[in-house]
Image (cartoon, grey):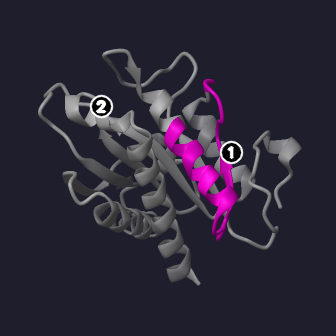
Amino acid sequence: MPNDRATGLKPVALPAALPVALIDPGHGGHDPGAVYDGVREADLNLAIALRLKSIWATGFKPVALYLTREENRFVALTHRAEMANELGADLFVSIHCDASPRPEVSGFSVHHAPGAEGGEILARCLHGALVRTLPGRKDRGVVASSFLVLKRTVMPACLVECEFLSHAESRAWLQTPAAQNLLAQAVRQGLEEFLHAAV
């Protein structure tokens, strides 16, 4: 089990032999991410991540789950990647909401670093779970993207764009507990699928 005092991270209390996952709610503190009609991306990212942590704390627990933040505070992008590497995490998932200057654009997508085989496998597992869990939402696919947190992490890593804050219906949907629960359940199912395939 990683040394909590060294990392400052708070895990779900699980046996040390389990794989370790670091979940990264994007933005936070003075970095709100996308903001539309007063709705801050950072707050939604955190709500989804905390829901995911709650699922693991009360149900089936295939991994020791850590979060890069559990409150509205700023964490630098480089530090997020350093947390994952220093923790010795087996996988890393960053949770975000998307935005576009075109208000009609909507949908979810999952990103991995270009050429990262493990990251692509993880992304496809998460993407498949999102497709199954969110049949009514637009699927924007799996995308190779050079996000810093994906390039700087040494384990399989991906970034989930849950929906578009710039799309009015999606923005309203993302704020509901039902949507946040569905997204958390989908991430959990995708992680379980990835870990099962890696055994």
Residue located beneath label 1 in the image = 83
- Circle 2: residue type: Ala
Q: CA–CA distance between discs 1 and 2?
A: 32 Å
Q: What crowding class fits label 1: few (fewer than 14 Cα within 10 Å), some (14-19), or many (20 or more)? A: many
Vertical order, 31 against 180 (above or below): above
* Residue 25 sits inside the magenta stretch: no
Q: Which of marks 1 and 2 is in front?
A: 2
Q: Do the residues labelled 1 and 2 touch (CB within 8 Å)?
A: no
Q: Residue 172 carries which label?
A: 2
> x, y (%) of residue 174?
36, 37
Q: Is residue 61 left or right of residue 17?
A: left
Residue at image point 29% right, 31% down: 171
The location of residue 156, given as percent across then percent down, is 52, 63
The magenta-colored residue range is 47-74
Q: Determine the image quadrant of residue 8.
A: top right
> 146 or 170: nearer the eye?
170
The quadrant in which residue 161 appears is top left
The kind of secondary structure element at disc 1 is helix
Q: How far across and how far down the image is residue 45, in percent?
A: 48, 37
Q: Is residue 162 visible?
A: yes
- Please report the residue visible at 39 percent of the width from the left and 65 percent of the height from the top: 120
Dot 2: element? helix
Q: What residue type is labelled 1?
A: Met
Q: Is residue 125 left or right of residue 141?
A: right
Q: Residue 176 carries which label?
A: none
Residue at left offset 34%, top offset 49%: 145
Residue in front for this viewpoint, 26 or 132 = 132
Between 56 and 65, the one lying in front of the other is 56
